[in-house]
Image (cartoon, rainbow, N blue to C red):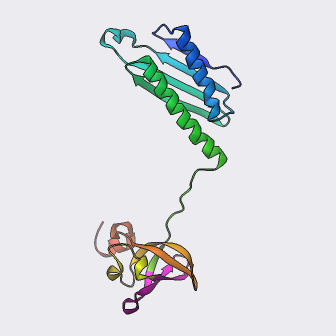
Amino acid sequence: MQIPPIVQARELDLPPSLNAQVHEQALALERYYSPIIRCRVTLEGPGRHHRQGGPYEARIDLRVPGGDLLIERQRAGQLQAAIHQAFSAARRQLEDYARRQRGDVKRHEPTPEGQVVKLFPDDNYGFLQTIDGRELYFHRNSVLPPGFDELAVGTIVRFAEEPGDEGPQASTVAIMDRREVPELSSKEGRP
């Protein structure tokens, strides 16, 4: 950490032993993401609500290369519990941030869509046309429920493309809900 951790206590007397524990936990965050620039921990006591046992609050502000991470106030009936919750949240955010920085975050490609253009029900297969104009083979066993028998020429589907024995083919073919297809919804008089 480039700047030593800062621990602020408001509306409470922070014992030196607890202050030292909070500093240790702040320094330990570097195990999850080492280039932390600054860490500020704010601990707040129940204040005016001490007779009612109002919650303790812990908040952590982290400065990292490229931005700031703010761990929202964690509230608990005990100060130790609020501190524990705040540092657990900080570890998760740092792990997520580190994954994003490394490019490890999974990016889901949109599921391709196509339209059934040929059906051969007696032979249990058909072809669909992709948005880019290619025709892909699919087999009855590749169609998800409600199933192959519900398909018709013109049905809009989503699918996964995979290599087949004779070139690319469609698998995991799913019939799209008519409400998802604007041109089908409007033809049937639906909004």
To which quarter of the image does residue 57 belong? Answer: top left
- Indicate whether 118 appears above or below 43: below
- Indicate whether 76 appears above or below 168: above
- Location of the C terminus by quadrant is bottom left
The image shows residue 42 at horizontal and vertical percentages of 52, 19
Q: Is residue 110 left or right of residue 125?
A: right
* Predominant SS along the magenta part: strand
To which quarter of the image does residue 149 belong? Answer: bottom left
Look at the image and say whether residue 103 sits in the magenta stretch: no
Residue 161 in view, yes or no: yes
The image shows residue 10 at horizontal and vertical percentages of 48, 12
The residue stretch that appears in magenta: 116-138
Q: Write the residue at 56% across / 13% down.
A: 19
Q: Write the residue at 40% across / 10% down.
A: 47
The image shows residue 181 at horizontal and vertical percentages of 39, 70
Task: Pick out the residue farthest to the left.
Answer: 189
Residue 118 in view, yes or no: no
Q: Write the residue at 54% across / 62% down.
A: 109
